Image: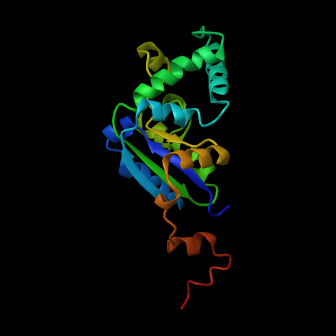
Amino acid sequence: MKKERTLVIIKPDGIQRSLIGEIVGRFERAGLKLVGLKMLVPSQEFIEKHYLVHPEWRRITGEKTIESYKKKGKKPPHEDPYKVTEIVLDNLKKYMSSGPVVVMVWQGIHAVGIIRKLIGSTEPMTSDVGTIRGDFTIDSYEISDLDGRAVRNLIHASGSLEEAEKEIALWFKSEELIKYRLVQEQILYDINLDGILE
């Protein structure tokens, strides 16, 4: 568990807002370790692979989107979850390939859950103050739907350990992930803290 890994992508809007350092700093301050890092402009085909790495993504995302519309008393664009995700995926491909992204692998105890907590919920408007999305962006599903685009929420993070493993394997070769020790790991993980005093 101490070596749990997760994938994080700072999306094109996060890069354009000059938030790379702020985002990285939050993960470092939480005690996580950066073990992989690259910057690139992904193709739309690659972004499709990224989202479809989870075999049930189309169905689950479509159902969640339909439910979200209905909760707000609005009519979803379709009742078929697969048709809804066609729209969602098309918008995501345009958004995620519109400029450079920073792709990272973070490691540490509960890495998946800690990072999900730090970034906040998918919709910036409903993200808590203190989260990355809650503090640094003001977009909403309503506005993105009106504009016919993906919600600009700065960052992607794997939703589960299984998803993280698949996403990391898609974005990184094993030799691109660095194994090294941080001094702070002695404080975070050493049972007796017996390495402090001389």
Residue 79 position in % (x across, y down): 66, 10
Q: Position of residue 83 (x, y in %)?
A: 60, 14
Which residue occupies 65% across, 48% down?
161
Q: How many marks?
A: 0
Q: Residue at x 63, y 21 (%)?
A: 62
67 horizontally vs 31: left or right:
right
Q: Nearer the viewer, residue 74 or 63?
A: 63
Relative placement, left or right, of 141 versus 1 is left
Residue depicted at x 62% and y 20% = 68
Q: Is residue 4 above or below residue 122?
A: below
Q: Quadrant of the N terminus?
A: bottom right
Q: Where does the image place residue 43, in percent across and percent down from the top left? A: 40, 34
Write the residue at 49% across / 29% down.
125
Q: Nearer the viewer, residue 138 or 53?
A: 53
For residue 52, what is the image quadrant? top right
| Most distant residue in the bottom direction | 198
Quadrant assignment, res 70: top right
Q: Is residue 178 visible?
A: yes
Q: Position of residue 112 (x, y in %)?
A: 61, 49
* Residue 69 vertical position relative to residue 27 in the rendered view, above or below: above
Does residue 71 show up? no
